[in-house]
Image (spheres, helix red, strand yellow):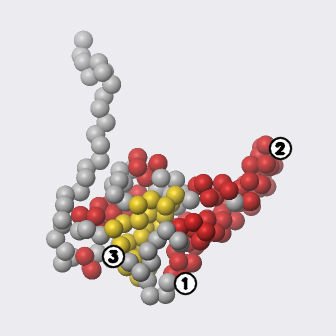
Amino acid sequence: MSVLLVAIGTTRAKAACGGADYLLARGVDVGLITVEAEPWRREGLDPRVRLYALAAGEQRHPAARLGRAVRRVSAAAYTKVFGKFYRLLRPYVLWRVVRADVLRQVDWAAVEQLVICDSHAIPIGWHLARRHPGLSVGFELDRGPYLDREPVCAPVPPPVPVPASGSDIDA
C-alpha cells in the first residue's frame, strides 16, 4: 500500500513533508511527483520518499526545446511572447511527461491515495483521477485509514547544518 503526492512547486512543502513523515512512520510507502527533486531535499523531505522528477522529461518536450531556441535568438521575444504562451501550455507538457515516464513506474494497484499538494498539480491530479476512478484523491492527506497503525519507526530528523570551522569562536 502506498500514497502518491503530486506537487509541482514547494509552496506547501512543510505540509507535504509532514504527511510523508506521518505515513513513513506507519510503514506506508510514499511517492512524490514533482519537477525537481533537489528543492524537496532542501525542504527536509525524507530520503525514503520515492521521487519522480519531471524536469528531464520536460526539457525533452518539443515545446521546451522551441522555447530554448527562441531564447537563444531573442531573450525579449521569449519574455514577451513565448514565456506567456508556455506558462499556459506547461500543465499539458508536464502531464505528457507523467504519462510517458511516471505511469509505468508506479504500482497503481498499491496506491491508496493521491494527494494534490499545490494548485499547479491540479491538472496532473485530474488526469490521474480520470485514469484511476477508484482512487481516493484529495488536497490533504486523509489520515483516517492510518490512525489505527502504530508508528513502526521514528521519523528521520533533517540534517543539522554544521558551522564552518572557526566561525563560532569569539576572539
Q: Residue at x 74, y 49 (%)?
A: 68
Marks 1 and 3: CB-CB under 8 Å? Answer: no
Of residue 99 and residue 88, the one placed in the foreground of this image is 99
**Residue extending furthest top?**
171
Q: Is residue 59 above or below residue 6?
A: above
Of residue 73 and residue 132, the one placed in the foreground of this image is 132
Secondary structure of the residue carrying numbered label 2: helix
Give the position of the N terminus as an image quadrant: bottom left
The residue type indicated by label 2 comes to Val
Q: Residues within 10 Å of mark 3 (few under 14, many from 20)?
A: few
Q: Is residue 84 visible?
A: no
Mark 1 sits on what residue?
Answer: 130
Q: Residue at x 61, y 65 (%)?
A: 97
Mark 3 sits on what residue?
Answer: 1
Of residue 84 and residue 164, the one placed in the foreground of this image is 164
Going from N to C along the chain, the mark reached first, 3 or 2, is 3
Mark 2 sits on what residue?
Answer: 73
Going from N to C along the chain, the mark reached first, 2 or 1, is 2
The nearer-to-camera label among 1 and 3 is: 3
The residue type indicated by label 1 comes to Arg
Give the position of the C terminus as an image quadrant: top left
Q: Residues within 10 Å of mark 2 (few under 14, many from 20)?
A: few
Secondary structure of the residue carrying numbered label 3: loop
The residue type indicated by label 3 comes to Met
Q: Is residue 148 rendered to the left or right of residue 100? A: left
**Residue extending furthest right?**
73
Q: Residue at x 28, y 75 (%)?
A: 143
Q: CA–CA distance between discs 3 and 2? A: 49 Å
Q: Is residue 117 rendered to the left or right of residue 28? A: right
The x, y position of residue 71, in whole percent, is: 77, 46
On the image, which quarter does residue 51 sit in? Answer: bottom left
Going from N to C along the chain, the mark reached first, 1 or 3, is 3
